[in-house]
Image (cartoon, helix red, strand yellow):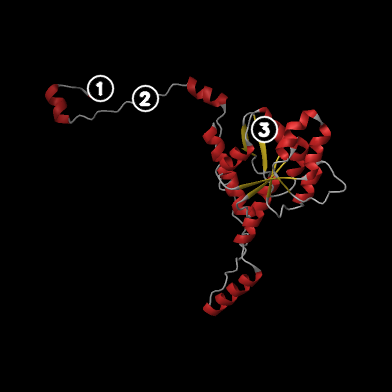
Amino acid sequence: MKIRRYKHARRYLSFYRNNFSFREPHQVLIDGTFCTAALKYKINIREQLPKYLDGEVQLLTTQCCIREAESIGQEAYGAMLILQRFQPRMCGHRNNPVAAADCFLSLVGKNNSNRYFIATQDPELTVKIHRIPGLPVLYINFNAIVLEKPSTKSTEIAEKNVSQKIKPSEQEKETIEKLKKAVGIEEEVKRKKRKRKGGPNPLSCKKKKVKLNPESSKATEGKRKRKRRKRVHVAEHVKEHFGISRTETT
């Protein structure tokens, strides 16, 4: 199970590298919910995250996250202590702190230009993250850190970018047309085939089978056919020799 989890992480990381230009060190924004789950399952975030992502990692948070953990009280006291050890990222909410989810979304923006990872256990925040392309999510499943599969929005944008790279640009199309004319290659125009009138259906031209009348067939069955006997012609000298008369030969 552990090997499969690491294989999935490598595959998803290569997806973000190839399609959204993610590079090391990986910047991970961590909120209080993630730290609470790490405390519950005894996960050392500073040790296990670099191993799981197989590279250098920057553990980041914001003042909004720390203040949110402080406001919760004793239940989030351990999470607050962990968050204070991470590097704070300037979010612009110093005088007017907001919820951790809103703070992270403001940092990420519409396209995650700074290439952040978000580590959270908040389901509402995760739903909002799925609408932003190229934004990976980390969460804790029992006693393991898991990198979530890329969202449908991320895969759609990646496929669109690949198709645009493959297609030639307008300038390239013009140069191709010029080269074709210079070499003497012209595109063949596809001619439309005319529909010709077909002949009659061969099945309709067949002669109709004559059906026999059942009454006439029964009448013929009742009559017996007369057999003709063939006459045997015997020579006269043979008759005289054996003494056969004319009537016997018939």
Kindly tell me whether residue 61 is visible in this rendering.
yes
Q: Which quadrant, please, contains the C terminus?
A: top left
Residue ranking furthest to the bottom: 182
Kindly tell me whether residue 121 is visible in this rendering.
no
Give the CA distance from mark 3 to mark 1.
134 Å
Name the element at disc 2: loop
Checking the image for residue 28, the label placed there is none
Q: Are marks 3 and 1 in contact (CB under 8 Å)?
A: no
* Depth check, front residue: 177 or 239: 177
Name the element at disc 3: helix
Q: Amino acid at mark 1?
A: Thr
* Depth check, front residue: 172 or 125: 125
- Could you classify mark 3 by the number of other residues whose Cα lies within 10 Å: few (under 14), some (14-19), or many (20 or more)? many
Label 2 vs 3, first from the N-terminus: 3
In the image, residue 190 above or below residue 57: below
Checking the image for residue 227, the label placed there is 2
Q: Amino acid at mark 2?
A: Lys
Residue ranking furthest to the right: 96
Which residue is under mark 1?
Answer: 247
Q: Position of residue 160 (x, y in %)?
A: 66, 55
Q: Which quadrant, please, contains the N terminus?
A: top right
Which residue is under mark 3?
Answer: 38
Residue 147 falls left or right of residue 224? right
Residue at (65, 56) in percent of width and height? 161
* Depth check, front residue: 189 or 48: 48
Q: Position of residue 47 (x, y in %)?
A: 59, 39
Give the CA distance from mark 1 to mark 2.
21 Å
Label 1 vs 2, first from the N-terminus: 2
Give the CA distance from mark 2 to mark 3.
114 Å
In the image, residue 177 above or below residue 208: below
Name the element at disc 1: helix
